[in-house]
């Protein structure tokens, strides 16, 4: 027991490190996450298993897969919502935001990023508080809402400063600077890059390749081409040393290098970088980046005076852009379909489970439902009353009329019991135990009150017009009722036994009546 507990604690700690540390090698982390999933499975801890699955899915996203990963993330999100795990649900929504970001659906990405922040409460770690607000800023910027994005970045910055999350603050500055650059604000991007470099120097932080790439992009956008080339050389060296944030990293780095070299007039070097970038885009299916490659190629041809080739590259870029829109629509459809299929399968499973817990003839709950749900209800509410009702002389209906007629009587009695009980005890339920026997559960109802309610139901059955089913024959029920708290021990078995005993007394007393409180001795004497 202690060994299992320690293992679960150690796995939880390992998962927290994975969840709250930036992973430099997504491919290796994706493989490592499989071991976390295996360990969680072996422990039989469903919460840890879902956390491990989500981490693996997040790393899978960074290797370029969308549809299958989207399905896995949505499955975790649904599970977390159903089990009230707000922290896991928030992380899953943040991952969903990334799915839609990669598939080009900015609106859906924003929807999930916003939910990921709204779900945070006082139990959320400071890392998550900061990071989810940063990602919300990214999502807002994707939709063009830069003023709102800057507001979220400032909120995240204030939290990071206050809690001394220096490495996370560096990453925040990087994301902020890059969105300013992408939204056509090179001066604003340069200001944020300057803050990131100053911050990193102050706290001894090393700029990783993604951050260096942002610096290089901003330098090139501001005409600082020589500085951009040196920055991108350091960036590419970091990639070669094993820092791979995303499968498309090298292609992005080479494209920025091509722009910087073209700015310096190094056209041969620019073409070399662009050729490497194009090969990487094709290899990893980076169609959005390939559109930019065509644009850069046109600029490069124009720079050397080959305007015909520049025009051809522009035409290729337009065609690639149209193809990209089609692919983005397909990727969005795949992501949405994957999530829909997950929800559909879950709903189907729920339907099957619901069917398994209901009597197929009457639609009432069945004995399996009683055995699964009643113990917990009794443990929570010792004042619950249980009643066993039986249709009087039901065998005669089957034998003298038909089993089909008997089934119609069962269905109508079930309907009367359920309708009348719902009016008197809204939180109770009726179940068919088998044959013509039913269980009525009345939460928080003392036996005297339960007896009055059940007697009213008994009269409703007897007063019902049965002539359209069985002619002038009467249909009545006998009922035995007992309250959990009045039995020793106060258990399901003891209470049902007492209700059965009272039902037997009702039958022996002439039927069509409700009986409670029959002593064991009296029944034995009658028997």
Image (cartoon, helix red, strand yellow):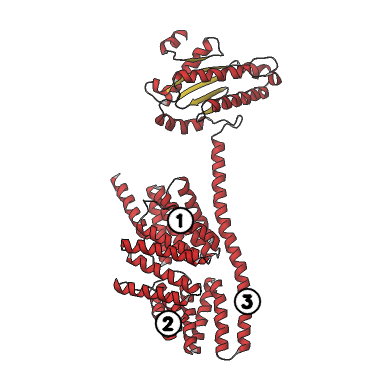
Q: Helix, strand or loop at disc 2?
A: helix
What residue would you read off at disc 3? Answer: 318
Work out which quarter of the rendered image holds the N terminus and state it: top left
Question: In the rendering, which numbered label is found on residue 228?
Answer: 2
348 over 431 or under it: above or below: below
Check disc 1: other Cα within 10 Å, few if <14, some if 14-19, many if 20+: many
515 over 63 or under it: above or below: above
The answer, for residue 30, to whether it is visible in the render is no
Out of 141 and 352, give the one closest to the viewer.
Answer: 141
Check disc 3: other Cα within 10 Å, few if <14, some if 14-19, many if 20+: some
Q: Earlier in the sequence, mark 3 or mark 1?
A: 1
Q: Earlier in the sequence, mark 2 or mark 1?
A: 1
| Cβ atoms at labels 3 and 1 below 8 Å apart | no
Out of 73 and 194, give the one closest to the viewer.
Answer: 194
| Distance from Cα at disc 2 to Cα at disc 3 | 28 Å
What residue would you read off at disc 1? Answer: 116
Residue 261 place in picture, x, y as percent: 47, 86
Q: Earlier in the sequence, mark 2 or mark 3?
A: 2
């Amino acid at each position: 027991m202690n060994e299992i507990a320690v293992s679960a604690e150690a796995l939880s700690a390992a998962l927290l490190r994975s969840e709250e540390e930036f992973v430099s090698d997504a491919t290796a982390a994706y493989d490592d996450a499989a071991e976390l999933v295996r360990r969680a499975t072996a422990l039989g801890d469903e919460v840890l298993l879902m956390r491990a699955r989500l981490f693996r899915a997040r790393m899978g996203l960074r290797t370029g897969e969308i549809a299958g990963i989207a399905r896995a993330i949505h499955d975790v999100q649904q599970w977390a919502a159903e089990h009230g795990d707000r922290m896991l649900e928030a992380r899953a929504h943040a991952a969903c935001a990334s799915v839609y970001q990669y598939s080009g659906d900015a609106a859906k990405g924003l929807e999930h990023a916003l939910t990921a922040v709204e779900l945070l409460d006082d139990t959320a770690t400071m890392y998550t508080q900061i990071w989810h607000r940063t990602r919300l800023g990214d999502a807002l910027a994707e939709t063009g809402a830069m003023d709102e994005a800057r507001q979220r970045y400032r909120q995240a910055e204030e939290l990071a400063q206050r809690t001394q999350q220096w490495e996370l603050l560096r990453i925040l500055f990087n994301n902020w600077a890059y969105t300013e650059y992408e939204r056509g604000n090179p001066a604003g991007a340069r200001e944020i890059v300057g803050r990131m470099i100053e911050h990193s120097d102050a706290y001894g932080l090393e700029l990783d390749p993604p951050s260096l790439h942002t610096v290089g992009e901003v330098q090139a956008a501001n005409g600082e081409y020589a500085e951009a080339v040196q920055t991108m050389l350091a960036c590419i060296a970091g990639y070669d040393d094993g820092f791979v944030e995303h499968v498309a990293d090298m292609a992005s780095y080479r494209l920025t290098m091509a722009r910087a070299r073209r700015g310096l007039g190094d056209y041969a070097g620019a073409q070399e970088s662009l050729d490497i970038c194009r090969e990487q885009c094709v290899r990893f299916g980076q169609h959005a980046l390939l559109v930019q490659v065509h644009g850069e190629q046109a600029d490069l041809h124009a720079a050397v005076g080959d305007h015909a080739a520049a025009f051809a590259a522009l035409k290729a870029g337009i065609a690639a852009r149209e193809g990209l829109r089609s692919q983005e629509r397909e990727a969005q459809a795949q992501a949405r379909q994957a999530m829909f299929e997950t929800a559909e399968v879950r709903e189907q499973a729920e339907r099957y489970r619901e069917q398994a817990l209901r009597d197929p003839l009457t639609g009432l709950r069945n004995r399996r439902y009683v055995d699964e749900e009643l113990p917990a209800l009794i443990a929570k509410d010792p004042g619950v009353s249980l009643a066993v009702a039986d249709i009087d002389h039901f065998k005669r209906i089957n034998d003298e009329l038909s089993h089909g007629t008997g089934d119609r009587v069962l269905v109508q009695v079930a309907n009367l019991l359920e309708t009348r009980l719902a009016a008197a005890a809204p939180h109770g339920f009726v179940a068919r135990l088998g044959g013509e026997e039913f269980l009525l559960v009345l939460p928080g109802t003392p036996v005297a009150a339960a007896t009055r309610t059940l007697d009213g139901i008994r009269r409703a059955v007897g007063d019902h017009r049965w002539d359209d089913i069985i002619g002038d024959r009467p249909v009545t029920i006998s009922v035995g009722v007992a309250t959990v708290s009045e039995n020793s021990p106060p258990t399901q078995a003891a209470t049902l036994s007492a209700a059965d005993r009272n039902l037997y007394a009702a039958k022996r007393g002439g039927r069509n009546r409700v009986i409670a409180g029959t002593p064991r001795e009296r029944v034995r004497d009658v028997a």
